[in-house]
Amino acid sequence: MNKLLPAAVLAAAVAGVAATAPARADSIKPAILFDMGGKFDKGFNEGVYNGSQIFSKQTGIKIHEFEVQNEGQREQTLRKFAKAGDDPVLAIGFAQADGLTVVAKEYPKTKFGIIDMVVDLPNVHSFVFKEQEGSYLAGMLAAMATTTKKVGFVGGMDIPLISKFACGYVQGVKAVDPSIAVYQNMTGTTPSAWNDPVRGGELAKSQMERGADVVYAAAGATGLGVLQAVSDAGKLAIGVDSDQNYLHPGHMLTSMVKRVDVATQDFLTDAKAGKFTGGLSALGLKEGGVDVAFDKDNAAIVKPEWKAKVEAAKKDIIAGKIAVHNYMDDNKCPVS
Amino acid sequence: MSGTALRLPWWADYILLPLLNLLLALLAAGLVVVATGENPLDAVVTMVNGAFGSGEGIGYTLYYATDMIYTGLAVAVAFHCGLFNIGAEGQAYIAGLGVALVCLYLDFLPFWLVLPLAIAGAALFGAGYAAIPGWLQAKRGSHIVITTIMTNFIAYAAMEYILVNVLIKPGQMSPETRYFAPNAVLPKMDAMFAAIGVDIAATPLNLAFVVALLCIALVWVLIWHTRWGYSLRVVGASPRAAVYAGIAPAGRVIQAMLLSGALAGGVALNEVMGAQGKLLINFPSGYGFTGIAVALMGRNHPLGVLIAAILFGALYQGGAELTFDMPAISPYLVVALQGLVILFTGGLATMLRPALVRALRIGAGAR
């Protein structure tokens, strides 16, 4: 037995060295692949960018970034990140899913993340948001605030994701008062629909001419034009993605916040701490992934009883007493 | 300043002059790179290396070039008939529908049957869509530039509607169809080379590149070696002379647009049936517009289009490498670089020509 001891010590020492190697994982080399639209889109991508910048400032770790310019670059760039030793790699947007599926299989040891889509692989963590839940609450507020019994919705590009926002919103409106009419418009059919504030403003104006006095914009930078037009007309607007209440204080009913920044920070921080796990985070009201914003800029507009009703509904949704239909489940909305 | 006084040997006109223009464009782009605080020489090395320095780089360069060969040829063919086809983008988009319908619903057929059907689908849908502005130009005198721009927007809207409401694979966010069956996808170059025992890097480069090269030869024969091509060029040069010679311009205009649209459909072959293996939203990504620059730079000659397409493919691929390796250089700077290349090689193509004539005359000695 004695003879074996040195060997055991040696083995333990080797194991110790091996065990300390991953401990150096706190110096990670993160990379982010932004979607088309770029990291300064005043919305979705920029939320991710802001979250990553906070992480960068806190840790001093630089982030390797790339902005996709065409379809061919998605898979190519993910592979290049992995090949260059970048780890973890975060892909932004639902359109990255197919490329990520291929590359994550090729590099099973690299940690990947994706926002807005599910990729079911052991080395991928997927973040999706229950936008319908936050939009439901926004719809309730709109229904309580309207005096004309007409409210509006301006979407960006006409894709299922935006219909998911719209459908949650309509459900919230109808839950308060089924007789309220909801006018819905999509800005366009190309990615430029995310970046057309003038057209957004025009759509909002036409909805207001038809009587709408609350308009919800889920349209990226196009939404900025919606908020401007609504505020100019002295009506109420609802912002999206980040808390946009500060843009037009007194004319912003609320903002449906989608915390991509927090998801990004969590992803990077977990990876740095060596706590990365594959799997899915479906971030809804319960997880603080979506919410409606109450702050000083809309405190004067939101009556306490509205807020109380919204908080009650929020509790019911979290408890499962209210089921908000997800448009993406069947590409249909039960109400319109 | 008569025409003969400005005559240059062919190599000066077709090789030296474009090279000088390209050099000027790179110099101007270098100044922009300096302004961002990066070393322009490093930037050029990174770009060239990224585009041609590895098997993967070459594969991607040629993959991008494939799209631009198709759209470049489409613009060039229309141009020979005096038509400025801005609508290659929309024609390629609609052609994607033709390809997808074949690949989605006829995938029980073997590959050697799916391939010609898909090519026919791309060509028919592209040509059919180009026929509308062609007919409007020929019979109603509606200007082709205006109508092709308008048909682009109609194509965006129509394809968006079809993808979101009809062809989408249910339960997913991205407006795109399901993947085509393996026998309805064009083989990738790496797979084809692997089959004969040669190992090359995996890239989206696929069989559509070979078809594109065939199209170059086809266009060359059609435009310069057939009676039909001659009549097309006569209409382009002078419609009135064409009438005098007994050629009906209206027919040629429509036929030129049909061929142009069919060629633009090649983008769908490369992207939908080749690189992606599914129909997805916005797949033409602006290749239709880049095709205008490619045709302009290639002087509307098929070989020129090939060279210009490879150059632009290199700019796309090298540019991506540049922003990957040098984060200070934004993707928009790469777009600016492409713009400078278009400006100097297209817009200012003949700026240096008089100086070149003088320089060569001195070099050759006075006659």
Image: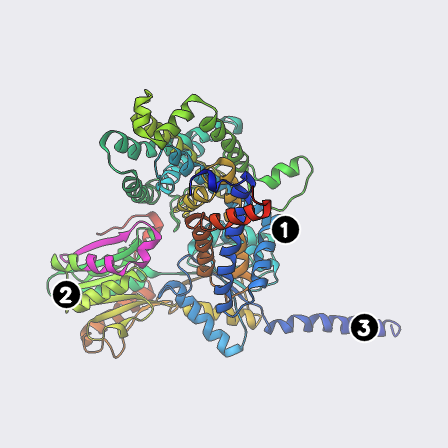
Tell me which chain the residue with mark 2 is part of: A
At horizontal 69% and vertical 37% (from top left) the residue drawn is B197
Residue A200 magenta-highlighted = yes
Q: Which mark is residue A146?
A: 2
Residue B268: x and y in percent read 44, 38
Residue B250, quarter of picture: top left
Residue A49 magenta-highlighted = no
Q: Give the farthest residue toward the right.
A: A3
Identify the amino acid type marked 1. Answer: Ser
Residue A301 left/right relative to B101: left
Whichever of callouts 3 and 2 sits on the residue coming sooner in the sequence is: 3
Q: Which residue is under mark 3?
A: A10
Q: Secondary structure at mark 1?
A: loop
Crowding near the residue tagged with mark 2, few <14, some 14–19, many ≥20 C-alpha atoms within 10 Å: some
Regarding residue A171, the answer to whether it shows in the image is no
- Of residue B305 and residue B15, the one placed in the foreground of this image is B15
Identify the amino acid type marked 2. Answer: Thr
Residue A39: x and y in percent read 42, 64
Crowding near the residue tagged with mark 3, few <14, some 14–19, many ≥20 C-alpha atoms within 10 Å: few
Mark 3 against mark 2, which lies toward the viewer? Answer: 2
Label 1 – label 3 distance at C-alpha: 44 Å
Q: Which mark is residue B54?
A: 1
At horizontal 10% and vertical 62% (from top left) the residue drawn is A148
- Of residue B127 and residue A67, the one placed in the foreground of this image is B127
Q: Give the farthest residue toward the front.
A: B367
Q: Over which residues does the magenta segment extend?
A: A179-204
